[in-house]
Amino acid sequence: MLKNLFILILLFASVCVFGQGKFIAKNAYISFYSSTPMEDILGESNESVTILDAEKGEVIFQAIMTTFHFKRALMEEHFNENYMESAKFPKAKFKGTIEGFKKEMLKGPVSGIKITGVLSVHGVDKTITVPGTIGLEDGKLVGTSKFKVIPEDYGITIPSVVRDKIGKEMEITVKASYLPYNQ
Amino acid sequence: MKIKYSVILVLAIVVICAGIGLKMFFKPHADINKLEAKFKVEAIILIAEFQKDENAATLKYSEKPIEISGKLVAKNKLPNGIQVLVLENEMEGISCQLDSSWVSSNKPAIEGLQNGQTITVKGICKGYLMEIKVSPAVLVIK
């Protein structure tokens, strides 16, 4: 009984905390996946940094391109050298706002939220709207998103020889587990 | 007779090329444990370098194997099981993601780590995002 009460107080306290200020995740997960009859390509990074402003509903993501790891060393090499040109464009960034943001959303889970903002990849800025979820998961504020991008939209040219091996669209999966951020 | 040798020669070239191609395709990731560190640096010095001039430090260290010594301030396990060691400052220090295959064969060494102790980590420097990202990394056991 006492234990339950304690958990209840803890949950209530975390909900109160989650209504204000900024939140940070320094090890957010981002993956992109493309499936074709020839080969599945999956690149994963656990090193993206994201900040969520719980007052304005603003979200910022940043990732270092070379932190994406692939099953095959050759895939990683091609990704960085031929497609993303990671030496020239080392970081990707997204800055957006949750549409119709209300602080109550943070007490969720709320699915079907929409985030509109600018995605900067490979030196190209593009305004996109992506779906997502937000809310408490095991006492932590968690945000997720899954959307598709077309490499050519970001000036990434894939040679015709390997164009069939790489899907036309890349599926991007994002998951961040936020902690309160005291600046 | 000449044609027969030519056919054998062409076949041999095709086999060698296919072999090289396959070897490249299945090339394994570099084993960080065996790579020699290009730089051996104190954690606080590395942090100061990145904070002073990110571009210059990125140019100097990015994608290079480096060995860093510093104070362990946090040992985190990510939801997908990846082990992270943070040096010097939890928010703006050095975040080292350990190589998962190395971790699985060196569990006692990881479990024995205590916050506050000085450790040495070897890994590939990835650059700066609020903190210095190093991955994959291994603990240097002296």
Image (tube, rainbow, N blue to C red):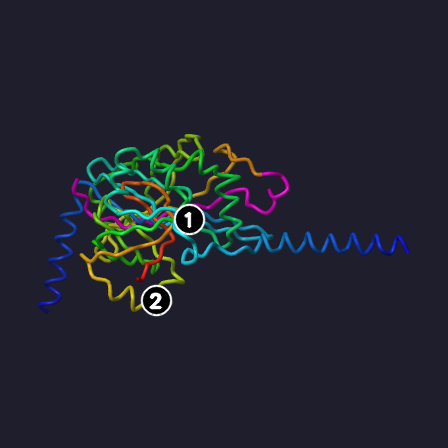
List the residue tagged with mark 1: A31
Q: Residue at x 25, y 38 (%)?
A: A57
Per the image, is A168 magenta? Answer: yes
| Residue A117 picture quarter | top left
Image: B141 above or below A175: below
- Marks 2 and 1 sit apart, C-alpha to C-alpha, by 27 Å
* Secondary structure state at the residue bearing disc 1: strand
- Left or right side of A21 for A128: right
The residue under label 2 is which amino acid type?
Asn
Quadrant containing the C terminus of chain A is top left
Per the image, is B16 magenta? Answer: no
Task: Report x, y in % for residue B57.
Answer: 33, 37
Q: Residue at x 37, y 52 (%)?
A: B123
| Residue A24 picture quarter | top left
The span picked out in magenta is A159-183
Task: Report x, y in % for residue A2.
Answer: 8, 67
* Secondary structure state at the residue bearing disc 2: loop
Task: Report x, y in % for residue A103.
Answer: 20, 42
Mark drawn on residue B21: none
List the residue tagged with mark 2: B106
A86 or A166, nearer to the observer: A86
Task: Report x, y in % for residue A39.
Answer: 57, 53
A131 or A123, nearer to the observer: A123
Q: In which chain is the residue bearing label 2?
A: B
Of circles 2 and 1, the one toward us is 2
